[in-house]
Amino acid sequence: MNGFGGFLMRRTIGTLATLLAISVIVYVVFYVTPGNVAQITCGPRCSPEQVHQVAQQLHLDDPLYVRYWHFLQGLVAGQDYSTGTSVEHCSAPCLGLSYQTDQQVLSIILTRLPVSLSLVFGAMVLWLVLGVGTGVLSVWRRGRLTERVLTGLTLAGWATPVFVIGLVLMIVVCGELQLLPFPQYVKFTDDPEQWAWNLLLPWLSLALIESASFARMTRASMLETLAEDHIRTFRAYGVGERSIVGRHALRGALAPVIALNANNFGSAVGGAVLTETLFGLPGLGQELVHAVSVVDLPVVVGMVLVIGFFVVLANAVADVLYAVADRRVVLT
Amino acid sequence: MSEALVATQAPEASASGASGARRFWRRLRTQRAATVAAGIVALLVLVALAAPLLTTLEGQDPTTYHPSLIDSARGGVPTGSLGGISGRHWLGVEPQTGRDLFARLVYGARVSLGVAFSATVLQVVIGLVVGVAAALGGGWIDQVLSRITDIFVALPLMIMSLALLAIVPQSFPRPVLVTLVIGLISWGNIAKIVRAQTLTLKGLDYVAAARLSGWGAWRIARRELLPGLAAPVITYASILIPVNISVEAALSFLGIGVKPPTPSWGQMLTAADVWYQAAPQYLLLPAGALFVTVLALTVLGDGVRTALDPRAASRLGVGTGRTRAAVTTSTATSTATSTSTATATAAAKEESE
């Protein structure tokens, strides 16, 4: 198989394989944990009967691969859970049941997904604008004070942990200056304006950190392009500096920036977990941290799979976009 | 093109290890920012190593509660002025517990640096073993190892660490656990780099000569390949250390990494926002320590890369006294953010040109 179709095909298969591998790793690691899995899953307040029931529902007597198979079946076809008095149907894709909260993992995730998507995509717009803008400006003003200042700021942003920026922003803006109230999540559908105001600081915290890599990447790619022969030819023909930097050099940065954006998704998601926890946003990250701290295994497993799914998907999209944006790439 | 350059450079450097190291130091020293950063890093390491000595000098330790120094009626604010700074407590005391802040800060350096350095060593060792084995093994061994590497590259570190830290019993020593989790999850990129470099080295005459003289794979790997792998591995490792510091800090900040009473900078920040008015240094000290450490390590990492990469070195005119790397090549930027395919795509891009 050659050409772009074959490349897409191989990437898709590779992505599916990675997802399957992640699900195996997560599942196996979790359900071979030391201690009584049924007791841990059920939570500390469960009676022995409830624990016994959980053990049966998780098929704990079966070998591991059979249990994993059940789990996959649930994902594809749904599953029934008996809650003692009634039978609850968990439709596909069924990620299981949180015995500690008596909620389906998928519904927990779905109620929190909009918050995380609001945070990440809003911040993404900001960090692309900030990052690429800083990169372009520092190339445009290269050799001058502006470049040095921007390079220093970028490095500082690069070196600051997201929760430190968030803490400082919150203390200065909400605490000392009282320009904004402490963020409290408002649904977009309830009040778009309040939604944006309350997300402003979380967006800024995440974007300031993430934009540093984009500024570095944009600047590096543009400088690399500027050193190429065709730019010298443009200059010889009298093309102005503004056009050379703003159009031709920027074009060279396009593919790497696209790739970085998708590739950085994993680290951005990690940053989002911190941002949500810090600002008390009821998103996936906050729930994951909570589930981890109370050891709600089904929620942790489901959450890791869903987030892993998004990250792996973003990486796959990055590869394809990169190949489209830069046809010089050898497709493998 | 670039790989050929690297390749011709590598054996030359390995042929005369001592002069290679000297040239490395010379190139590093010509970069002012990197030299300053190296000094700061050395100082931090010294503080971490001398933590028991420093706290003995102060006469405090990081875990003793001082209930007399905090005002429990006001929620646990330190009683002394400036957050309880005094001759006995150089940087004041922690709100609520009255534990000595200076002692916690210097012992925190031990945890933060210790975890980051050990995790990096673990990542490098696994990456080296897997990368070299894949490149030398070839065929199905390469296939299997490369696929496994791809999977590990794709794992989101923060999320996976969070999950893994949840299931290990609390009795397991947390700093060791955080080290293991970081090291065992994110070795994929380094394995990829090692594999690519080994494949290049493998095709060179001096390795072929070693093989023809009947050397075993192990001896070839150790004597002929390892010196050639040193430059890319050291470069990447120097980028990983600050990343690992941030990850440890983040996990501990979330209350899932290093737990009290063991101090760590990230964990000290967990409750700091509540106390910023009464004891601002409770927030500023660990935050500042993290910032300075990550910044110094990053600048040093850039310097190390410039000193080891002959292309960047000549392009930047290092030796003419110019400061920090003016050009951050896309390869290094992408690896620094622990991305997956950017490295591979950048490599692919170079091959295609």
Image (spheres, rainbow, N blue to C red):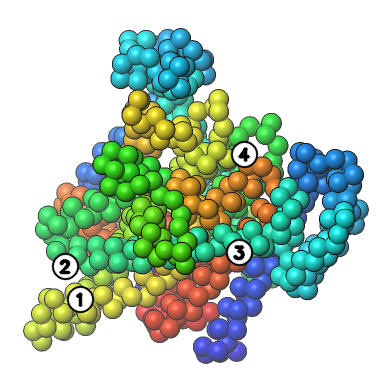
Residue A229 vs B195, above or below: the answer is below
Assign a secondary structure to mark 4. Answer: helix
Q: CA distance from mark 1 to mark 2?
A: 8 Å
Depth order, front residue of A228/A260: A260
Q: Residue at x 24, y 44 (%)?
A: B33
Residue B183 visible? The answer is: no
Residue type indicated by callout 1: Gly
Q: Pointer 4: residues within 10 angstroms few (<14), some, or many (20+)?
A: some
Assign a secondary structure to mark 3. Answer: helix
- Are the residues under marks 3 and 2 on the same chain? yes
Residue type indicated by callout 2: Trp
Residue B3 position in % (x across, y down): 40, 68
Callouts 1 and 2 close, C-beta under 8 Å: yes
Callouts 3 and 2 close, C-beta under 8 Å: no
Q: CA distance from mark 3 to mark 2?
A: 44 Å
Q: Which-is-in-front pick, marks 1 and 3? A: 3
Depth order, front residue of A45/B238: A45
Q: Residue at x 51, y 15 (%)?
A: B65
Read off the residue under disc 3: A110
Residue B78 vs B246, above or below: the answer is above
Read off the residue under disc 4: B177
Q: CA distance from mark 4 to mark 2?
A: 47 Å
Q: Residue at x 23, y 58 (%)?
A: B326
Residue A127 position in % (x across, y down): 34, 62
